[in-house]
Structures are given as structure tokens and as C-alpha cells.
Image (spheres, helix red, strand yellow):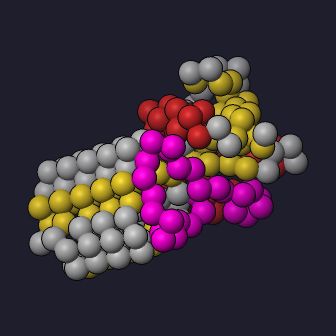
Amino acid sequence: MKEIIILGAGGHCRSIIDVIELEDKFKIAGIIDNELPVGSRVLDYEVIGNDNDLEILRSKYEYAIIGVGQIKTPKVRIKLFNLLKSLNFKLPVIVSPRAYVSKHTKIDEGTVIMHDALINANVKIGKNCIINTKALIEHDVEIEDNCHISTGAVINGGVIVGQGSFIGSNAVTKEYIKIPKKSFIKAGSIVK
């Protein structure tokens, strides 16, 4: 089984661990974190280094995924994504077996689809995105790079979510609208 490292040791990391374990396509080799000391544990996995160790770790590990969440800004996730790409890591798409993803959907590298998300036909999801637990992405939606669609959010048909946007928990969009890049949509919002 291929090994993967996870960058970041917070709550989103723990959620990704759960998805990776359930998906059973990768063995988690360890966690990379700048604050926890090497040898610390996150769930059942050891912290094996920090960002400064990634170049050395690349000689041993081919795959990595970003376990840092995104609320106010995608800057940290973008920085980590670019760092991993510069070191030639492969960033797979991680999909919970408990999610439904239409076979007519395109998902780009480094994106994570969490438990019970539902993604319908003709959806395009960019790089380095989080589609969080129980999010609903309807037909013909385009989610650009570095977006976080939060828990229980509903993105209705034909919507374009601009690059770097955050859509809060239980937010609902009207169909066929464009959400500008770097938007921050608060939890529970109705977006018209």
C-alpha cells in the first residue's frame, strides 16, 4: 500500500485521518507539524517532522495531503500546496467511501471529499479544496481552486464558486450565480 504524509496536526488532520483509514488506499506514514515536537502523536500516528524536513522526507515518501483547515483565508493551504508541488510530491484526491461522487465529476489534485458529501453530475472541483461533511454540491457546479465548502453547505445547480472562497456551515446558494473569488460566506447564509 502506498504511504502518505499529512501536513498539519489539528482538527482537520484528525478528520482526514478518519477518511484515509476508511478509504484504505493509503497507509499514513506520519504527520508533519511545525508546533508539535517529533514523536508526539495525533490519534495513532507519529509526528515525523516539520515543514523544514519535507525536502528530506520527499526521498522516502511520494504522496502528501494538506491537513490544515481553512476558515478565514486559504493562504496557509496555498503556501503548503505550492511547497509540496515544488518538492514534486503527489497530492491525491481523497474521497470518503461514505460520500457519493458522480462518475461524471472532475476533481483535481489535493482535494478532500469528507464523509456523507454528495456531489452530483457534471461538477468540476479544483485543486486543494475541502468538501466537508454532508456538503451538497448540485449538478453543473464549478468550485475553483483552494475553496472550502463547509459542513452541511448546499451549492445549488450551476453555481461557480470563485477561487479561495469559504462557504460556511449550512449556507445555501441560489442556483446559477457566481460567487466572487476570496469570498467569505458566513454559516447559515442564504446567498442570492
Residue 35: % across, % down:
57, 31
86 on left or right of 143: right
Snapshot quadrant of residue 121: bottom left
Whole-percent x and y of residue 110? 58, 57
- The location of residue 23, given as percent across then percent down, is 59, 40
Vertical placement of residue 157 versus 190, above or below? below
Residue lying at 53% horizontally and 38% vertically, measured from the top left:
19
Residue sitting nearer the eye, 80 or 166: 166
Left or right: residue 66 versus residue 37 is left
Residue drawn where x is 53% and y is 49% of the image = 95
Judge whether 67 appears above or below 100 on screen. above
Q: Which image quadrant: the N terminus?
A: top right
What is the residue that sits farthest to the right in this orientation? 59
In the rendered image, residue 87 lying in the magenta stretch gets the answer yes
Q: Residue at x 32, y 46 (%)?
A: 134
* Main SS of residues in magenta: loop
Q: Which residues are magenta?
A: 85-110
| Residue shown at 70% from the left, 41% from the top | 26
Residue 64: % across, % down: 68, 48
Residue 15 makes an appearance in the image: yes
Q: Does any portion of residue 34 appear in the rendered image?
A: no
